[in-house]
Image (spheres, grey):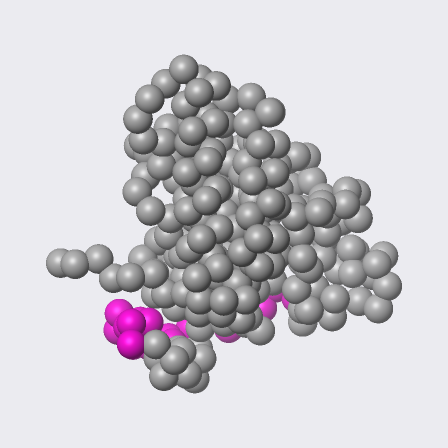
Amino acid sequence: MARLPRLTLPGYAHHVILRGNNRQAIFSTPADYRFLLALLLENAKKCEVAIHAYVLMSNHFHLLATPSSSDGLPKLMQAVGRTYVRYFNHSQQRTGTLWEGRYRSTLIQTDRYLLTCMAYIDLNPVRAGLVSQPQDYPWSSHLHYLGLRTDPLITAHALVWDLGNTPFAREAAYAELVQSGINSVQQTALTDSALRGWALGEADFVADLQKRTQRRVAKSHPGRPFSSTILHS
């Protein structure tokens, strides 16, 4: 069966995953992590993509991003992916592919799942057993939202600003949100929707998306929500 084109629409939040081939390591030194972050910063500006959250794991990375044009996200990922492979192969004196094919992504319903997706991204290192607390992991956007670091890569979404009237209130609310965690149903839904490319949202959201693109946005039962649980109200 032919692979569906990616579902990419401007103005919507996209959850993006790019994995190393055969789950191999894509970073070898701290300099590698910094180089990829610099590439993301440079190309996010060029391609007009707002990056709301990220985590760089040893063999893959996640982004939560909103492109301003239909080709902004593909151009960003293509530029970052190609340049990083050349850099990594040269530094490691290796040849061949680094990535597990193309990046995976999908649209998420912002008002329902954006904050949940941010928590999911921040908690990746905890789930992997790398740290006990997300703030102990240096290669994510979590410290930015706690007010412990200013990350030039990050553009906070309006929903983050709505968490409080002051920086301290927003930081405390976000810390509480992430500490509350996400349940296994939410975790599976966020992972599977990105890997399979089906939009994640309620029926009305998915139906509206389908009007905006000829590409199918749901496999079956469009918009069937995975849970009514909201991390933070």
Whether residue 7 sits left or right of residue 163 in the image: it is left
Whether residue 91 sits left or right of residue 206 in the image: it is right
**Residue 94 or 63: which is nearer the viewer?**
94
Residue 70: quadrant of the picture: bottom left
Q: Position of residue 101 (x, y in %)?
A: 30, 42
Judged from this view, the residue extending furthest toward the front is 46
Residue 121 visible in the snapshot = no
**Residue 171 or 144: which is nearer the viewer?**
144
Q: Position of residue 233 (x, y in %)?
A: 67, 71
**Total marks placed:** 0
Residue 98: quadrant of the picture: top left
The residue shown at (41%, 15%) is 93
210 falls in the magenta region: no
Judged from this view, the residue extending furthest toward the top is 93
Residue 61 visible in the snapshot = yes
Residue 57, relative to residue 121: is it above or below?
above
The residue shown at (77%, 45%) is 150
**Residue 58 or 93: which is nearer the viewer?**
93
Quarter containing the N terminus: bottom left
216 falls in the magenta region: yes
Judged from this view, the residue extending furthest toward the left is 1
Give, as a single range, the part of the protein colored magenta: 214-232
Residue 51, relative to residue 141: is it above or below?
below
Residue 183, relative to residue 135: is it above or below?
below
Q: Main secondary structure of the magenta part?
A: loop
Q: Position of residue 153 (x, y in %)?
A: 65, 48
Residue 118, relative to residue 108: is it above or below?
above
Q: Position of residue 89 (x, y in %)?
A: 41, 23
The residue shown at (29%, 72%) is 215
